[in-house]
Amino acid sequence: MCGIVGIVSNKSVSSSIINALKKLEYRGYDSAGISTLNNGIIEEKKCSGRVENLEKILFENPSSGDLGIGHVRWATHGVPNQINAHPHSTEKVSVVHNGIIENSDKLKMEYEKKGYKFKSQTDTEVITIILNDYLKSEDLINSIHKTLNKLVGSFALGVIFKDFKDIVVGARRGSPLAVGYGHNENFIGSDSYALKSMTNKISYLDDGDFCILHKEKVEFFNSNKQKINKEIFEVSNEDNVADKGDFKDFMSKEIDEQSNTTKKCINEYLDKSRDEINIYNIPIDPLKIKKIRLIACGTAYHSCLMAKYWIEELTSIDVEADIASEFRYRKVKLNKDDLYIFVSQSGETADTYAALEKCKKNGVKTCGIVNVVESSIARLSDFVLPIHAGPEIGVASTKAFIGQMLVLFLLILKISKDRNDIDQKEFKKIIEDVKKIPNLIKLTLTKQNEIQEIARDFIDAKGTMYLGRGYSYPIAMEGALKLKELSYIHAEGYAAGEMKHGPLALIEDGMPIVVLAPKDRFFEKTISNMQEVIARGGKVLMITNDTSETLSENIRFKFQIPDAHPNISAFLLTIPIQFLAYHVALLRNCDIDKPRNLAKSVTVE
Ligand code: M6R
């Protein structure tokens, strides 16, 4: 993961680098650092922890210089301390790196034999040393090219040099790198969002490319050192502002936004006058699709699991959902008649991207469902459906999850209708339900205080389970993921019917358990499983749209979601499980937007 930035300008760059790093902190917050070239000397400053720590250092001891690089780290090789923080510099070269150099140990040994000493435990420092070494005998372009050729793994790099006083170099293989164009200044950054306050004119490096930023121009080279031209994109300013407003943290803001984001998404895809879904040019004629394969990681994978249930229910198409880190290495039989759907909020997740690349190499048709439309996954996919959720900053995915489910649901409905798997009447009925989603979410959001109360039951729990059947099962998995990543309490999402095959042994007196039981065709069965848990001492938080009083005496708390068709209950079940994770984490004084050990965008495998 990690975030990198580089600027060459006609004015001091350190404050712009710091601002860009703040925007990149979603990619890692283990350490932060900056190098500038000041009067021909590389000045490196770095620290463990957040960008605000680096800011304090610069406040006491400012960095000058009109070119520089910066870094925020998500530790892979070496503990997250000051020595392992980037940049990694010699007197001649300073490097920031996002990704993993897989052959770093071998390279380290090779260069130690040549007499080089390494200061850090990182895989990155070898890049600095190799480049430094080549520069003794080669010109700049050859030094860069030869260095890159020695590296195995994935990287995006930013480099400054003592002896090349007016350039910043960028390079990409596997990890994304955007180039921004300004007036008498140019930039590199891990994404366009980091550069947005400085420019909206962006190009992207492709794998193997490197670039040289000058104040007035940018030169691009491919992996054969040949000069190449790059298309310049204008990125939209619409989603420029990502601030917390009056909210305590981004996560609570993003949960609260979900009524609006779903409304916006529905407006983008639904022609309300004709009740038609505006999704055209699906890369395989829906009538000919044999199978749909959904591939993603984490929360996005849970949206795929949800889609699996919908596809089975609403179409005659075979379906599979896969975790990207498994899919990319499995000997999956890729078929030209199958549609491969990749879901990712960031559009940069390394495993999802690699799985997409595998499909592209095999010539099968791909569809990307992303939040960041300028992302690598969006650019590589044959067909892209944005979720229109706006920037999601909290590491725990909330509004993106709802957006992913919504776009998947609309796509499935469209395919189902085009294939005549669903009749016109049923289609219209479901469309009416879809239109209700934003308001039903709004209603559910008003009940936050109920969850705030019940959250107290969880704060000292050794562990908990989220149980559901059918459409509620993927939401149970998502609920458990949310709780563990935010509050560090062990949680499992389980198919309620599977409890008796082992996990029931975990239930002990007073253990809090979440049961998702909307009134659908699984309701009675879920209730039986819930009773089995209660009988063993489980303290149940039941989330349901059932209004009968009969069950109430046995359960600890019943959270009522609005009544809705089972097809869309997933959207409503999601709100209380987000609130629960949020409030438990808050009560346990956890960092809501930046949970420990995690990062927003996972650009390493
Ligand atoms: O950007 P992506 O949607 O590809 O990210 C995938 C996962 O890393 C992500 O959903 C992760 O599981 C979230 N932090 C969960 O809240």
Image (cartoon, grey):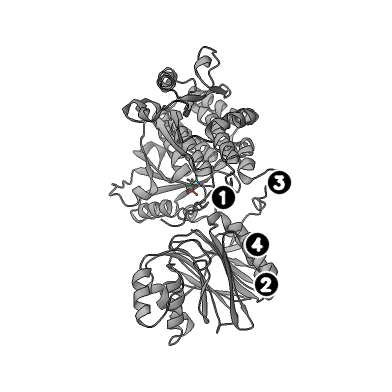
| Labels 1 & 2 near each other (Cβ < 8 A) | no
Callout 2 amino acid = Asn
Callout 4 amino acid = Asn
In what quadrant of the picture does the C terminus appear? bottom left
Q: Which of marks 1 and 3 precedes in the sequence?
A: 3
Kindly tell me whether residue 282 is visible in this rendering: no
Q: Answer with left or right where residue 292 lies relative to residue 163.
A: left
Residue underneath mark 2: 61
| Labels 3 & 1 near each other (Cβ < 8 A) | no
Callout 1 amino acid = Lys
Callout 3 amino acid = Gly
Height in image: 80 above or below 401?
A: below
Q: Answer with left or right where residue 386 lies relative to residue 100.
A: right
Circle count: 4
Q: Which of marks 1 and 4 precedes in the sequence?
A: 4
Q: Position of residue 228 (x, y in %)?
A: 49, 72
Q: For the residue labelled by badge 1, is the local secondary structure a helix, a strand or a loop?
A: loop
Residue underneath mark 4: 19
Disc number placed over residue 594 in the picture, else none: 1
Q: For the residue labelled by badge 2, is the local secondary structure a helix, a strand or a loop?
A: loop
The answer for how far apart the CA atoms under marks 3 and 2 are is: 31 Å
Residue underneath mark 3: 245
